[in-house]
Amino acid sequence: MEQKNNTLLFYTLLYFVFLYLPVLFLPLFSFNDSNFMSFPLSGFTTEHYEEMWKSTNLHKALWASVKVGVVASVVSTTIALFAAKAFARYKFRGENISYGAIMMPFLIPEIILAVSILVIWLSLGFKLGLVPVTLGHILFCTPFAMLILIARIEGFDFSLEEASRDLGENAWGTFYRVSLPLYLPGIIASLLLSFIISFDEFILAFFLTGSDATLPMYMWGQMRFIQKLPHVLALGAVIIVFTTLIVLLAFWLRNLGQGKDKADFGIKIHE
Amino acid sequence: MNNSFIQINQISKHFGNVKAVDNVSFEIQEGEFFSLLGPSGCGKTTLLRLLAGFEYPTSGNLLLDGSDITALPPDKRPTNMVFQNYAIFPHINVEKNIQFGLRKLGLTNEEIRERVNDVLSLVKLEGYEERFSSQLSGGQRQRVALARALVRQPKVLLLDEPLGALDKKLRDEMQLELRTLQKNIGITFVFVTHDQQEAISMSDRVAVMSEGKIQQLSTPNELYKNPHNIFVSDFIGETNFLKAETKSKDGEHINVSIEKLGEFKIKNSLNISENSSDVICSIRPETMMIDKEKSDWDICLEGKIKQTSYLGEITKFYIETKEIEKIITVSSQYFDNQSFKNNDCFISINLDDISLLNKK
Ligand SMILES: Nc1ncnc2c1ncn2[C@@H]1O[C@H](COP(=O)(O)OP(=O)(O)O)[C@@H](O)[C@H]1O
Ligand SMILES: [Mg+2]
C-alpha cells in the first residue's frame, strides 16, 4: 500500500516537472543579467522588465489584445449562455447536431479555421485587422464557454425559475432576480477563461491581424532580434503569471456555490 | 350559468403520444380543500401545472372566478404554488424569499413588513428571517414555501405533494396544521398527493386519477364507502375482491352469484347490468368478523389462518377458505395472533358490506 502510493507520488512529481520546468525557465532567465539564455546565471536585474515596458509598440499591442479579448469573451459567453440554457433546459429536435456544430471549432485544427476565415474574409473584399481576429476568437472561445456554462446550468433546479414566474415575475424579472445571480459564478468564469484564451491566441491572429499586432504577434515579431530576447522573456513571464491567476480565479468561481452549502454563495445581487 | 370557482372544461394535455391529462372536466368550489389523488405518473402534477400556468392545455379551457385563464402566463394568474421540492431561492434568505412575490403588488414598505410578519407567525417561522435554505430542515423549508405563496394572498393555493419529503410524525402533524390553516384563512386549496390516507383525512372532496382520467370525484366518505370502480376500490384503503356474475335485477337490488359461495341479493347502487361476468365484488377487511365460533351473519365460512400481522390497534389475518380462491384479509380489534388454536376460525360477512363493481 505504502509502496504503491510512493510510486504514484513519484509519477505525479515527474509529470509536473515535465509540464512546468520549461515554463519556469522564462521567469528565471528574465531576471538574469545577460542577453543569452544560458547557465551559469550571471546576476539579478529588473532591467529587462524596464526596457520591455518602454516600447510604445508593446502598449499598442497590449491594448489591441485587451480590446479583442473583451469583445470576444463577452460575445462568446453571451452566445454560450443562451445555447447552454437551451441544451440544459429543453429537449428539441436536432439537439445533438447543434451541440456538435457549436463544439466543432474545438476539434478543427486551428490553422484550418484560420485559413478558412482568411479566405472568406478576403473574398468578401474586407481588410485584415482586429475585426476578423475578434470574429475568429469568438468562434474559438464559444465551445470553451459552453463547456463551463453547461456544467453550471446542468445541475440547475429549473423549478426555481418557475417559482419566480409563479410569484409574479415575468421572464426578464426572473432572469435578473433568479437565473443571473445563480449562474453568475459560471458566467464570470466563462468570461475570464474566454478572455485568456483570446489573449494568448496566436495562430488566428497570425493569419488575420494584418498590421495591427496583438500581444502574441508583437512577441513573435520581437523574437527576430536577438538583443530583444530578454524583453520577450520578461513579457512572457508577466503573461504566464497573469494567465495563471485568471485561470485559478475562473476555476474557483466555477465551483462556487455548487457544494452542499448553498448559503456560502459569495455573490449576491442586491435589489 | 355556472358559478363554480374553478372550472376545468375538457382539458387534455399530451406530451408526444403520452396523454398525461385526458379530457378531464370538473369543478372546484370556493374555499374548498380539494385533493387530486392517484398513483405516480397518473397526471396529477400536470393537471396542477396547467392550473398554475406552467403548461398550456392541448385542448380545453380553464375558468377561475368567472374569467378564462387558459392562456394567461403564471405571473398573471391569481394562483400560487408550493412546489414538490419547495424551490426555495438559495441565494437569498428566508425573509427575502417571502418578500420575493410582493414586489409587483404596489405595497408600501409598511404593508410589506406587516404581511411578512403576519405570514411568518402564521407558519410559525418567527426568528428564521436571516436563515438560508441550506440552514433549514425539510419541515422548515416547507413552511417557507407555504409562507412565500400565502403572502401574496392568492385566490387558489396549489400544493404538489408538499408533505412527501417529511418523516411520518412530522407529516401527520403538518396534515392537521395545513387543514386548520386552510379553514382559518379560507383560501381554496388544490392539493396533490399519492397518499390515499392523506387525501382522505384532509380534503373536503377528492378526485381520484388514473392514466390521465378522473376515476371518481366525491367526498372522502363516499370514496371509501362507495367506490365507483375497481380502481378506486383498490386504491383507497384495502379490500378483498371476489369473482362474481350478475343475474336478474330486482328493484334496487340485483342477484349476484359469487364464486362458490352461492347466489345473493346485493344492492346495485352503480346500476350494473344483468347477466354480466365483467363484474367483481369488493369487501373491506374491517367489515368482516373473525371468530372462533359460527355466527348467524348472512355468510359464514370456515377458514384456516395462514398468516397474521400484528399492527397494535388491529391485527390482520390472512385466511384460506374452501370456497374462495384467493387468501382473504380480515382485520380485527378483538383478536390477535395468539387467539386461535390450530389456526381454525370462522369469518362472517354481511351482504350490506359487499359492493358490486364493474371491472372496467
Ligand atoms: N414535460 C414532460 N414531457 C414529457 N412527458 C411528461 C412531461 N411531464 C409529464 N410527463 C408524463 O406525463 C405523465 C404524467 O406525469 P405527472 O403529471 O408528473 O404525474 P404524477 O404527478 O401524477 O406523478 C407521465 O407519464 C409523465 O412521464
Ligand atoms: Mg407528481
Image (cartoon, grey):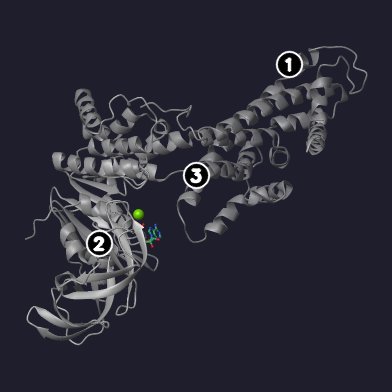
Give the residue at mark 3: A155
State which image quarter holds ligand 1. bottom left
**Quadrant of the image containing the C terminus of chain A:** top left
- Is B41 left, or right, of B69 in this rendering? right
Instruction: Measure the C-alpha gap from mark 1 to mark 2.
Output: 81 Å
Between residue B146 and residue A212, name the one nearer to us.
Answer: B146
Chain label for disc 1: A
Q: Please, what is the three-letter code of the amino acid marked with disc 1?
A: Lys
Give the mark nearest the N terminus, 1 or 3.
1
Q: Secondary structure at mark 3?
A: loop
Q: Nearer the viewer, mark 1 or mark 3?
A: 3
User: Does the image show residue B219?
Assistant: no
Q: Nearer the viewer, mark 1 or mark 2?
A: 2
Give the residue at mark 1: A54
Chain label for disc 3: A
Residue B64 in the image: state x and y as whole percent: 17, 52
The answer to which image quadrant residue B224 occupies is bottom left
Q: Nearer the viewer, mark 3 or mark 2?
A: 2
**Quadrant of the image containing the N terminus of chain A:** top right
- Is A228 left, or right, of A61 in this rendering? right
Same chain for mark 3 and mark 2? The answer is: no
Between residue B42 and residue A235, name the one nearer to us.
Answer: B42
Instruction: Measure the C-alpha gap from mark 3 to mark 2.
Output: 34 Å
Residue farthest toward the front in the current orientation of the protein: B341
Same chain for mark 1 and mark 3? The answer is: yes
Instruction: Measure the C-alpha gap from mark 1 to mark 3.
Output: 49 Å
Give the residue at mark 2: B208
Q: Secondary structure at mark 1?
A: helix
Q: Secondary structure at mark 2?
A: strand
Q: Which mark is residue B262?
A: none
